[in-house]
Amino acid sequence: MKAPAGTAAIAATGSTKPHLAFLLATAPHRHSSKFFHFLTSFGVFGIFLVSIVDSSFVPLPVPGVTDVMLIIFAAQKANWILLILLATAGSAIGGYLSYQVGHAGGMQFLEKHVPARIFKSVCEWMEKHAILAIALPAILPPPMPLSPFVLAAGALKMSKKKFITIFTLSRCARHALAVWLGIFYGRHVLHLWNRFSAKWAGTILIVLWTGILVSCAIAFWKLYKASKDVSTHSASLADGTNTTM
């Protein structure tokens, strides 16, 4: 008797990815798996790279991409410890880089890059509730803003050791939760996605690619502007110091 197509696909894929193989093999249309192929094509180490940008002050255009990737790989039975370590390490690097930018740029840089409507609140929270001001944005999902508080931590000269410890532990807790969701509910999430994406996966893929390309261009531009502003600010401080001497 000829084996069903879904069973053959699972056998061809191997036992390391049984859930995703089954879902992709039984999808109503080929387009339904494009989104997952796009995300998983980076491999688990792609989580490390994505989490760096996701935790920086120039985040990805799609909120929670790191969490989505963690859920997918956890559903595929990838090593959950490795997933959490890679995501946490990437987040720590991204947060540290943003902290350094805020520290070097000072309050002028912070005021320029944080929306005026939340600038005062961010500064007050950092001064009165420094630990919560870092931990909550690092743990909570969007739309909770992260970058204003990370930049403020640097601009207000929060202890570097204290910031790295709080930020890293908080992101680790968030990533661990995402992995847990992937292990216990990932298969159901992927199944629902396949049913929904039979019609819209192609459109979503185009939008995602466009968003990533645009975000990369914006990220490089903002990093260039930030480095230029910081250099100008440092030079002006040096000139002022030399003048008073």
Image: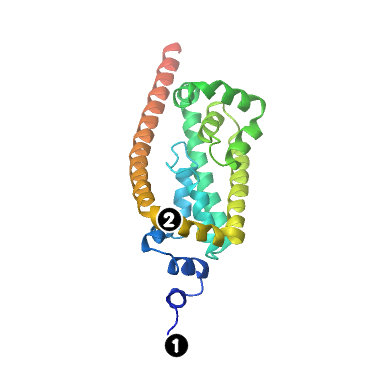
- Above or below, 48 against 16 in this view is above
**Separation of marks 2 and 1 at Cα, in angstroms:** 32 Å
Residue 191 visible? yes
Q: Quadrant of residue 144?
A: top right
Give the SS element for disc 2.
helix
x, y percent for residue 146: 53, 36
Q: Position of residue 114 (x, y in %)?
A: 48, 26
Local secondary structure at mark 1 = loop
Q: Is residue 131 left or right of residue 18?
A: right
Residue occupying image coordinates x 56% and y 60%: 188
> Which amino acid lies under the numbered mark 1 shown in the image of this protein?
Met
Above/below status of 66 relative to 158: below
State the residue at coordinates (37%, 40%): 215
Q: Nearer the viewer, residue 154 or 218?
A: 218
Front residue of 168/42: it is 42
Task: Give me the residue at 62% from left, 51% from top.
Answer: 177
For the residue pair 83 and 15, the one nearer the viewer reads as: 15
Amino acid on which the number 2 mark rests in the picture: Ser
Residue 194 at x, y = what percent? Answer: 46, 59
Using a 10 Å C-alpha cutoff, classify the residue at mark 1 as few (fewer than 14 neighbours), some (14 to 19) or many (20 or more). Answer: few
Q: Which residue, as the protein is rendered here, is positioned at the far bottom? A: 1
Q: Earlier in the sequence, mark 2 or mark 1?
A: 1
- Asked if labels 1 and 2 touch by Cβ distance under 8 angstroms, the answer is no
Does residue 243 appear to the left or right of 88 in the view shown?
left
Q: Is residue 227 above or below residue 10?
A: above
* Residue under numbered circle 2: 197
Q: Which mark is residue 134?
A: none
Task: Determine the residue positioned at 35% across, 38% down.
Answer: 220
Q: Determine the image quadrant of residue 201.
A: bottom left
To which residue does mark 1 refer? 1
10 Å crowding of disc 2: few (<14), some (14-19), many (20+): many
